[in-house]
Image (cartoon, rainbow, N blue to C red):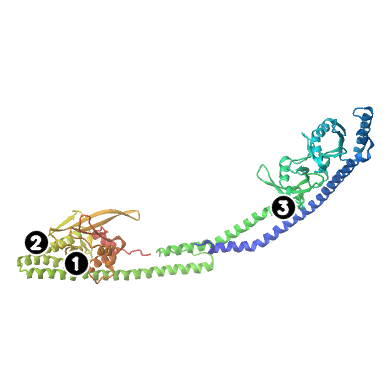
Amino acid sequence: MNFIRSLRFKFIVGLTLIMLPLFMLLYYNNVYAMKVVRDQVSLTNMNHLAKSVEQNERVLQETNRYLYSLGERDPDIISLFFLKYGSGDYIIAKQRIMNKFMTDIGFYNLIDSFFLYDAVNDDLLLATSGNYDVKMSIVQESMPVQMQQLEGEIQKPEWSIVRGGTWNALVKTVRINAQFYAGALVDMNALNHPEQFTESGDRGGAVIVGADGGALSDSALNSAQIKLAAAHITGLNKPYQVISEVTSTGSARQYLMLGIPSAMSEMNYIVLLPEEDMMRNLPFFQQIIRLLPIGAAVILITAMIFLRQLLFRPMNVLIRGMRRVSRGELDVRLETPASSELEFVTHSFNQMTSEIQHLKIDVYEEQLRTREAEFKQLQMQINPHFYLNSLNIIHSLASLQKHELVQQMAGHLADYFRFSLRAGKRVIRLDEELKHISHYLEIQKLRFPNKLDFVLDIGADLGHYVLPPLTIQPFVENAIIHGFQRRTEPFVICITARKSKTLSDLEPTSVLQLSITDNGVGFEQEILERLQQGQYAEDPGGQHIGIWNVIHRLLVKYGEQAGLQFSNQTEGGAAVHIHMPAQTEEEEGRAYAEPVNRG
């Protein structure tokens, strides 16, 4: 049955189309509410982030202006270029510069250190509010790179990122003259202000990441969260992004990601806000979104169970009953369902099958009577055919004045005619049929002395099986007429009978196999091909009337259980093989009397 055309499929589609708009409306309502929350939270936190970044960038720009002005406005730095390195005045000037740097650090709240580097003497002056040794090491390691970037007035990037072991910084270096370089150092952690962001929860936070995605500042975010945020840096031009993290348990955790790239360095300010903390004021909407598919499935399954009990089950019973009737089981009767509409349909079906059963019995009985009449008509057709051949033989012997042979032949012919009086029976025993054939062949031997012989190879336990009368004789006639030509050696006809077993519907069935062979000239190739293709049945009134009569009687009586094959033997001569069910008179009588199930 085509499921797409079934009522079950149509009901499913109909219920789905009815419920789909409702569920879509609920889903859209909840998604819209969540989007409003995302927009509001992202707007609030983006304003905080933008204000923080703007403040950082302003301090960095002011620091740039301060460093660029040192070479023009600070007399101590200018005088160092003309003082002798290591002299008293040189040391006093350096001390005044150190004091000035320490004072200025207080004005620039983000700046961690100011430094002055003497490239000629490899002397570094560092004023810092933090760990002096760490800052000194960082500046010394970064100076060769900073100086190389300043060659040819190259000022990119504005602020360079310097990575320490556990401490990262921004460094800005300017060239005052050919000997001195001044610069500032900013702690990355001073640029990050996670406490100002709302809805960050226990698993949210802020971080500064470089262009390579590596963290530059300390953060409450773990390494997996930072890696997740770094993978979405390219989307920072959007107001916000919703990104997902797969936890160790296999579940997905969503975050709202905000970010602003820095204009002063190759770094990005990133904020991650867990959605579950953002949506904690919307538990109802979250639960509805999670339960929508389950609710839809429950409603659909409940409706299908109801329809199955009310409609589909009675319809399936009715369909199975119709299929059984189509297979010929006309005794099918269905139980009456509770529904009044289906009760009428079921009652009509039971009444219809009862009427069909009685009608089919009447039709089959009429077919039996018709088949019996046809069988008797075909059986009587064979007698005139043989009588005509016998009279021709007697005429030929009389013409030769062989009166003794005529007398012998008359005796055999009398026995033959005596057999014909009983040939009107539906079936005869195999030994009776072979006795009749032996009379016929004795007649032919009288006609052709020393030129014709025959062999009957029949098992002793096969004579009691039955077959339609005159089944073998037409093929013996044809062998003598067509095979006994231009012979210089005796013509021998051999008739054999065997019984074999075959499987029919997984049960063994006995088959009677008859063979008529000779050592004559055999069939001509064209005639053999026609016989093998069954063309002898195309013209029952022509020269193959005997063959047509036999095969048609076998098919009428046994159907596909009987068959006929023609061939030429390799050593010469023709062969005809007949097979049919091996039945005794009692078995044949029962098979004939029992009705055949014709579907």
Indicate the amino acid at tag 3.
Gln
Picture quarter with the C terminus: bottom left
Other residues around mark 3 within 10 Å, as few (<14) / some (14–19) / many (≥20): some
Drawn side of residue 490 relative to residue 98, left or right: left
Q: Position of residue 373 (x, y in %)?
A: 26, 71
**Residue at label 1?**
423
For image coordinates 19% across by 67% down, the residue present is 423
Question: In the image, which is nearer the foreground, mark 3 or mark 2?
Answer: 2
Which of 571/349 is in front?
571
**Residue at label 3?**
286
Work out whether mark 1 precedes mark 3 in sequence or the reverse, and give the earlier one. 3
In the rendered image, the vertical position of residue 315 relative to residue 277, given as above or below: below
Question: Which quadrant of the figure has residue 555?
Answer: bottom left
Q: Position of residue 405 (x, y in %)?
A: 7, 65
Question: What is the secondary structure assignment of the residue under circle 2?
Answer: loop
Q: Is residue 192 visible?
A: no
Indicate the amino acid at tag 1.
Ala
Which of 414/91 is in front?
91
Give the distance between the C-alpha atoms of the residues marked 2 and 1, in whole angstroms.
29 Å
**Residue at label 2?**
449
Give the distance between the C-alpha atoms of the residues marked 3 and 2, in whole angstroms.
112 Å
Q: Is residue 467 visible?
A: yes
- Residue 460's label in the rendered image is none
Question: What is the secondary structure assignment of the residue under circle 1?
Answer: loop
Say if mark 2 contacts mark 1, CB within 8 Å.
no
Which of 177/597 is in front?
177
Indicate the amino acid at tag 2.
Pro
Drawn side of residue 530 relative to residue 52, left or right: left
For image coordinates 93% across by 38% down, the residue present is 74
Other residues around mark 1 within 10 Å, as few (<14) / some (14–19) / many (≥20): some
